[in-house]
Image (cartoon, rainbow, N blue to C red):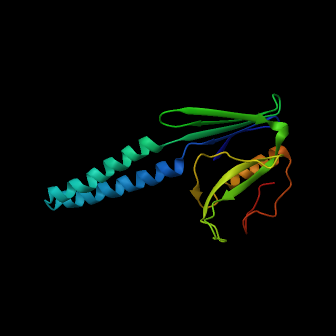
Amino acid sequence: MRVDEESEDRLVLRDTQLDKKLGISVLVVFLFVIAFLFAEGGDWIEASIPVALAAGAVVYLKLTLQSAVVTFDRATDRVTLSVTGRKNSEEWDWKLSDLEGAEVSETRGSGDSRGSGHKRPVIVLKDGTRVPIRPYHSAGAQSWNAIIAIRRFVGQEKTDDLPVGWISDD
């Protein structure tokens, strides 16, 4: 997630799955290089396989791409989450005054104490409800920029769960 707007009264976070777009783009380029090498050697049937796989990767990207926008607005006392997919769009909202903070949630299997490495940012409401602000999990801790921005916006001082070596910009 990236910060689109940050001021005293408003914070807007946007996730367009840029990491997914980049990964699929690299895969498609790699597949076309392989197809080119086969075609240069005269192996036209073998060259068609990577081209078909590249086309499948592009179709997969178009079918599964989602975007999410989270807006925190002090003036209206609202937090709005909008998620847009290929077929539909949904929107949720809460009172900003009901927001306690933000954290990174990690999926865990039954009996797994280490976690899967699949993480996503969540906002934590005062009643204990955890609301994902990204409609899917991702590998790694790329969600920390969003968490830090939300924590700064709501004045949450919690820093003991930051990754080792994390350097905050404040």
Q: Is residue 66 above or below residue 76?
A: below
In-image side of 88 versus 30 (left or right): right
Q: Residue at x 41, y 51 (%)?
A: 25
Q: Residue furthest front?
A: 110
Quadrant in which residue 76 is drawn: top right
Quadrant in which residue 9 is drawn: top right
Q: Residue at x 36, y 52 (%)?
A: 28
In-image side of 106 versus 159 (left or right): left
In-image side of 59 versus 35 (left or right): right
In-image side of 138 versus 37 (left or right): right
The total of numbered circles placed on residues is: 0
Measuring from the top left, give residue 68's x and y in whole percent.
Answer: 60, 40
Q: Is residue 24 above or below residue 91?
A: below
Between 44 and 80, the one nearer to me in the picture: 80
Quadrant in which residue 103 is drawn: bottom right
Measuring from the top left, give residue 167's x and y in whole percent.
Answer: 75, 62
